[in-house]
Amino acid sequence: MGRASGPSLETRRVESPASVRVIDTIEIKASLPVDHAPGLVVILEDYRPSDLPGFVGRTVRLRDDSGRTTRARIEDVRDHGATVSFFFPGLSTADVPVGSRVEFGDGLGDGGE
């Protein structure tokens, strides 16, 4: 089996960046005929943490291009191969526009709030 050229997923994996950019969003509205809570799925730019379940329940700061911030709790994490997505219940695309940043850091809480 040949080895692919370029950086491997392992070498691109980042464990604790200060922030990661949101490259796409999917809003799940209550009016949609899906079996899922309303909220927002944010797809992150080139982010591959090794401990995905460890992010569930973690509080992060969401900062848009204007500098407006929102604190939110990650309810679900999905692996998409090249990156991951986080689900934030009750948020919309107005809360987290594409280009926003998900910020990780001290003082945000670890899910115990």
Image: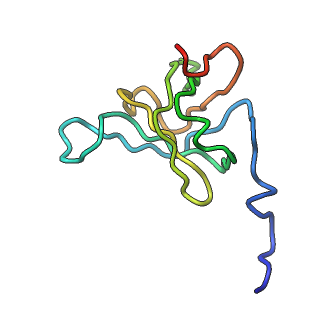
Q: Is residue 37 above or below residue 73?
A: below
Query: Which residue appears at 50% of the width and 31% of the height?
Result: 74
Q: Toward which corner of the image does residue 29 lie, by quadrant?
A: top left
Looking at the rendered structure, the number of numbered marks drawn on it comes to: 0
Foreground pick, 80 / 58 = 58
Q: Toward which corner of the image does residue 93 lie, by quadrant?
A: top left
Query: Which residue appears at 38% of the width and 28% of the height?
Result: 91
Looking at the picture, how far across and down is residue 112, in whole percent? Answer: 55, 16
Looking at the picture, how far across and down is residue 70, in whole percent? Answer: 51, 19
Foreground pick, 48 / 44 = 48
Looking at the picture, how far across and down is residue 98, in whole percent? Answer: 50, 39
Query: Which residue appears at 58% of the width and 24% of the height?
Result: 60
Looking at the picture, how far across and down is residue 43, in whole percent? Answer: 52, 46
Query: Which residue appears at 66% of the width and 44% of the height?
Result: 51
Q: Is residue 85 above or below residue 91?
A: below
Is 5 placed left or right of 103 in the picture? right
Q: Quadrant of the N terminus?
A: bottom right
Farthest-out residue, bottom: 1
Q: Is residue 101 above or below residue 7?
A: above
Q: Is residue 113 above or below residue 48?
A: above
Q: How is the image coloured?
A: rainbow
